């Protein structure tokens, strides 16, 4: 059938099973929005308050489901406002398709109104990007974009479409999407055998899990693997929920704000099996001293990650789910009771702790966990509150924790929570934010109230940039340069002005009733929780230090 380019865009989205898109219109993309109006019974468009909010919402949708998230924006500033969200998705390998329109082909390169080379801008932060200048190329390009976003190591793809292409017509025939290959790489049988030899020779194995295990849906295989090799398990921020955080084998997060049990356990282990991790500087602050007593097996779908940050003894390039399945098939049952006891002793000796006499972030997280029975989707912004959410909420399944790991994007969480709620409407969805982060994109509360999206925004309001202040306290002799947010902003009034219910929390006794009221309310709620400006996240490893130098508040007191 003969269709305009704009109609082809929407038809291709329907081909791919897309039901929800997030975006903000403008002049060059008006034809596409006119088409969305005609197809409104088939595709739900969510109008965000800012294009960055649309990108984060699409990202949250993708993380909550494993499907491709879709966002849209017009040319020029509309397109550039997507950039932070695209970069966030790129750093965390999240499947995203961003669709922009540009000026007509005859106006390209002439500094036309709202023209920008968005493919040039986003080249370093996308898995691939396209500019479409011929309507006949449009449908094949969109199909290719969705395939690229999902195949192999997932990631964002941008499609820039000139305005004349959205108006021009060509023949369109619906095509069934090609199957997505979960593994573009064929790992060697010899690698599997070598891994089994290393596992069988180990007396102190430790499993280290990252976001790749979530992306590959390797939850069941990972659980079986941990039982078979009889090993403790730790994770990265991105790996939360890939392994059940309530399982006794779980020792907590590894790295800068990981538990002492995980950091000291990995230091003492003789074999580290890393599943879908990047070995970033937040995990291996000093790569030369990371897991010094261990041989390392690294399983990852991206060959470029092998030996990139930490030298390993065996790299297995492949989809985590496939590789773990192959290992489970051939592995004999291992038994390491003494090693497990040693790690459990570390957990008992160095538990996470906080001041129980006053209102704190960890206390609030624990009450959210109790009132949601560990089943809520927890989104976060970036900073101290993010680390507390990672430490004190025990995630039982993948896609339950949604956070900007690699890029560390302040202002990410509110948009992501909206996207996650659209993806999983039956689930309770919280966003945990600091007051500094909340200021970044608090306008998205208007989006939540416009559509009556029942998310719960929890602000840990300490009137400072908490994590930066913590570094200034510990490493900059308390020179608090540009980190104090003492001003007259009232977040409850802001929330109410943007159409949301707001509750101020100033004492421990108010926490449980406030959370319960928010859970019972049919609509978006903001909890403005006032905590002390000098609360800190512990344990901690100083930047560039080895994992065995992990310290907490008791260590500081001893010094």
Image: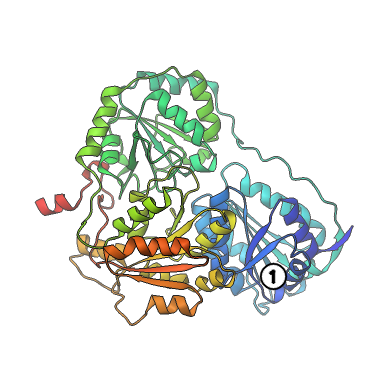
How crowded pointer 1 is (Cα within 10 Å; few <14, some 14-19, many 20+) is rated as: many
The kind of secondary structure element at disc 1 is strand
Is residue 215 in view?
A: yes
Residue occupying the point 75% across, 62% down: 41
Task: Using the image, determine if residue 356 lies above or below residue 514.
Answer: above
Pick the front one: 354 or 313: 354
The image quadrant that residue 134 belongs to is bottom right
Q: In this view, does 478 lie to the left or right of 64?
A: left
Q: Position of residue 455 (x, y in %)?
A: 49, 63
552 vs 204, left or right, is left
Quarter of the image with the N terminus is bottom right
Up the image or down, 293 lies above or below 211; here it is above
Q: Where is residue 187 in the image (x, y as percent from the top left)?
A: 55, 28
Q: Residue at (33%, 50%) from the top-left corner?
A: 392
Observer able to see residue 94: no
User: Which of the pair 363/180 is nearer the observer?
Assistant: 363
Quadrant assignment, res 361:
bottom left
Q: Name the outermost residue toward the bottom.
A: 488
Residue 336 appears left or right of 108: left
Query: Label 1: which residue?
Result: 102
Q: Where is residue 370 in the image (x, y as percent from the top left)?
A: 37, 51
Looking at this rendering, what residue extends furthest in the right direction? 1
For image coordinates 35% across by 18% down, the residue present is: 201
Residue 526 x/y as whole percent? 43, 69
């Amino acid at each position: 059938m003969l269709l305009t380019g704009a109609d082809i865009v929407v038809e291709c989205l329907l081909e791919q099973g897309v039901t929800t898109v997030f975006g903000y219109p403008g002049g060059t993309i008006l034809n596409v929005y006119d088409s969305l109006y005609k197809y409104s019974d088939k595709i739900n468009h969510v109008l965000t308050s800012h294009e960055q909010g649309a990108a984060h919402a699409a990202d949250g949708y993708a993380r909550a489901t494993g499907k491709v998230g879709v966002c849209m924006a017009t040319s020029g500033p509309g397109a550039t406002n997507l950039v932070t969200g695209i970069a966030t998705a790129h750093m965390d390998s999240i499947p995203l398709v961003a669709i922009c329109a540009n000026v007509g082909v005859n106006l390209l390169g002439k500094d036309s109104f709202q023209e920008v080379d968005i493919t040039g801008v986003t080249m370093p932060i996308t898995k691939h990007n396209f500019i479409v200048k011929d309507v006949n190329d449009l449908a094949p390009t969109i199909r290719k974009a969705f395939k690229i976003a999902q195949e192999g190591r997932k990631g964002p793809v941008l499609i820039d479409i000139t305005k004349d292409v959205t108006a021009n017509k060509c023949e369109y025939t619906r095509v069934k999407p090609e199957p997505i290959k979960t593994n573009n790489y064929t790992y060697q049988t010899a690698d599997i055998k070598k891994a089994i030899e290393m596992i069988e020779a180990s007396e102190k194995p430790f499993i280290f899990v990252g976001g790749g295990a979530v992306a590959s849906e390797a939850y069941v295989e990972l659980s079986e693997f941990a039982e078979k090799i009889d090993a403790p398990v730790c994770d990265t921020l991105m790996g939360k929920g890939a392994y059940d955080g309530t399982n006794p084998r779980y020792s907590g997060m590894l790295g800068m704000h990981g538990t002492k049990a995980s950091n000291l356990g990995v230091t003492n282990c003789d074999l580290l099996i890393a599943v879908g991790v990047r070995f970033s500087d937040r995990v291996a602050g000093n790569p030369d001293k990371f897991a010094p007593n261990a041989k390392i097996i690294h399983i990852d779908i991206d060959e470029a990650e092998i030996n990139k940050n930490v030298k390993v003894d065996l790299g297995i390039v492949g989809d985590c789910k496939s590789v773990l399945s192959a290992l489970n098939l051939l592995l004999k049952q291992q038994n390491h009771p003494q090693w497990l006891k040693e790690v459990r002793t570390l957990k008992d000796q160095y538990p996470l702790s906080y001041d129980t006499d006053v209102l704190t972030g960890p206390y609030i997280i624990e009450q959210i966990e109790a009132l949601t029975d560990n089943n809520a989707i927890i989104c976060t912004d970036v900073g101290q509150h993010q680390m507390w959410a990672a430490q004190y909420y025990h995630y039982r399944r993948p896609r339950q924790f949604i956070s900007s790991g690699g890029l560390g994007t302040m202002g990410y969480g509110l948009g992501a929570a909206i996207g996650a709620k659209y993806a999983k409407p039956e689930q309770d969805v919280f966003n945990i934010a600091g007051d500094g982060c909340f200021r970044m994109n608090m306008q998205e509360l208007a989006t939540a109230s416009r559509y009556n999206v029942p998310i719960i925004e929890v602000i840990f309001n300490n009137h400072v940039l908490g994590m930066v202040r913590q570094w200034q306290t510990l490493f900059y002799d308390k020179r608090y340069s540009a980190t104090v947010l003492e001003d007259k902003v009232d977040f409850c009034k802001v929330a109410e002005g943007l159409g949301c219910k707001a509750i101020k929390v100033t004492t421990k006794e108010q926490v449980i009733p406030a959370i319960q009221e928010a859970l019972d309310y049919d609509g978006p709620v903001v909890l403005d929780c006032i905590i002390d400006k000098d609360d800190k996240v512990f344990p901690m490893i100083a930047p560039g230090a080895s994992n065995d130098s992990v310290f907490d508040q008791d260590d500081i007191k001893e010094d």
